[in-house]
Every structure is written in structure tokens, then in C-alpha cells.
Amino acid sequence: MNRFVFVFLILFVFSCNQTKKNAFLASVGNSVLTEKEARLSADLEGGSIKEVVNRWVEEEILFQNAQSSGYYEENNSFAGIEKRLAGQLFLQRIAGERIKVSNSEIKSYYQKNKSGFIRKNKSARIYHFLFSSKKEAKTAFKILSSNKNEEKKNRLFEERGAQPVIVIDEELLPELSAPLFSSRKKKRLLGPIKSSYGYHIIVVLERFKKNSPIPLEEMYDEIYQRIYQQKFALKSLRILDSLRNHTPYQINL
């Protein structure tokens, strides 16, 4: 065989092998994902090559649209962060726009899922005060236990920023749980109770038994978030489908 032809064949085969080795599996605009990069990502993050490629295409489409819309440049907080996060922030912004959850939707959701809103443990709605010294706690207890001194009571609530909260038996400090839930007399004012954090006073507004229904007002914020996230997920899928249809990309699998 002619020496020149032999050398040419070797170079040709070597070139083909190199091209195959560095062949791209996907592209979005001018960005390219090589097989080597995809396999490395699969090793580091898990998943099949196909899953890696589809994930990369989605992230690249989001990132490039964030750039073309000017959203990326407008946010200095994006500087230095990876494409994945920038794209997700962009999606959160456009998908979150104009999503509304009405009171009627929340009430309807509550009624349809009412059987699931049951207390798993004893709980109570209380005001909680914490003091660093026993002397302070005793003074506050005296004010709260009096049928007079409404002005002092109001000042105490205001200064301490006291707000009614729901507490659950198993999540409380044992020092607080015992008198709150195990007391036979079911007192409305408890304290001062010493713990490693200081001295506590508890004003009991209402106690709830285990397996009792949770009213709508307690579940309102959680139901709102559930409905919002459902709408957000559906809207995100529609936006991604639209961006895919308007962004040139290629997958070679």
C-alpha cells in the first residue's frame, strides 16, 4: 500500500474517533453539551445520559431566555451564580406573575379535604412570655392574674410583642408540656415555669384534643400555599413548553 495512503487512513480513523469522542449530544443556540460532559454530569449527579441531556437542555433554554429578556443583566445578585440557579429564578419570576388564590378556592379546598385536617396530637392556642429573671416573671404573672390593671396588661403584651400561637404537645419543652396538657384543673394562667431558657408564663386561650378537627382559620395559610404551588407548577410547565417551541435546540441521542 502506498505510504501516503496508509498515513492518510490512520489520520482519518484517528480524526473520526476524536470526533465521535467529542461529539455533542445536545445544543441550545451556541451552547453545546458534549458526550464527555454529559457522562461526567451523570457520574456526579446521578441519572441516565438521557435524563442529563434533557435537564441540560431545559436549564440552558431558561438561562438563555433570562439573558435575552434582560432579566439576567438587571439582577446583580446573579453575578457569579451558576446557570441552573439563574434559570430557576427567572422561571419563578415569570411563572409567579399574576397567580391569584381566592378565598372561595381556599374554602372549597378545605371542604373537599376536611377529613385530612385532623389534629394528630393535643395542642393549644396560647400567649407565651419568657423572662430572664424570676422576679420579672413574678411581676408579670401578678399583672396578668389581676382583674384590674388593663393598661399594664396591654403594655406588657405590647412590650413583649405577644401574639397567639398554636403549640403541640410533643413539640414543647417537657417543663411546659406537663402543666399545659396534664393539669387536671386546666388552668388558664400558668407560671412562672423555670427551664434552661429562663422563666415562662403561659396564657391559655384554648386547648384542643387529639383527633379533633382543625378549623379553616388555622389551615388558611397552608392551604393557600398548596393551591399556589399547584398553579405555579402547571404554569411553569406551560412556560417551559412555550420556551422550547421558540428556542432553537437539538438533541442527538
Image (cartoon, rainbow, N blue to C red):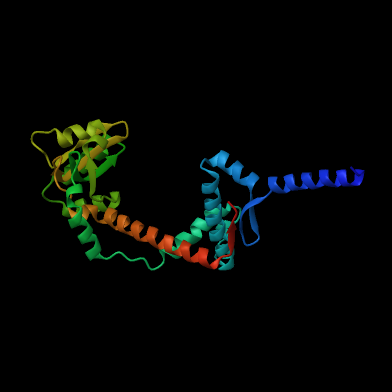
**Furthest residue toward right:** 3
108 with respect to 132 (left or right)? left
Name the residue at 91% across, 46% down: 4
Q: Residue 209: image x %, image y %? A: 13, 41
Q: Nearer the viewer, residue 40 or 189?
A: 40
Name the residue at 16% across, 51% down: 149
Q: Residue 12: image x %, image y %? A: 80, 47
Tell me the quarter of the picture where residue 227 sits: bottom left
158 with respect to 186 (left or right)? right
Quarter of the image with the N terminus is top right
Tell me the quarter of the picture where residue 3 sits: top right
Name the residue at 28% across, 31% down: 195
60 with respect to 103 (left or right)? right
Question: Against 24, is 178 above or below?
Answer: above
Question: Against 151, is 192 above or below?
Answer: above
Q: Residue 185: image x %, image y %? A: 8, 36
Q: Residue 124: image x %, image y %? A: 18, 43
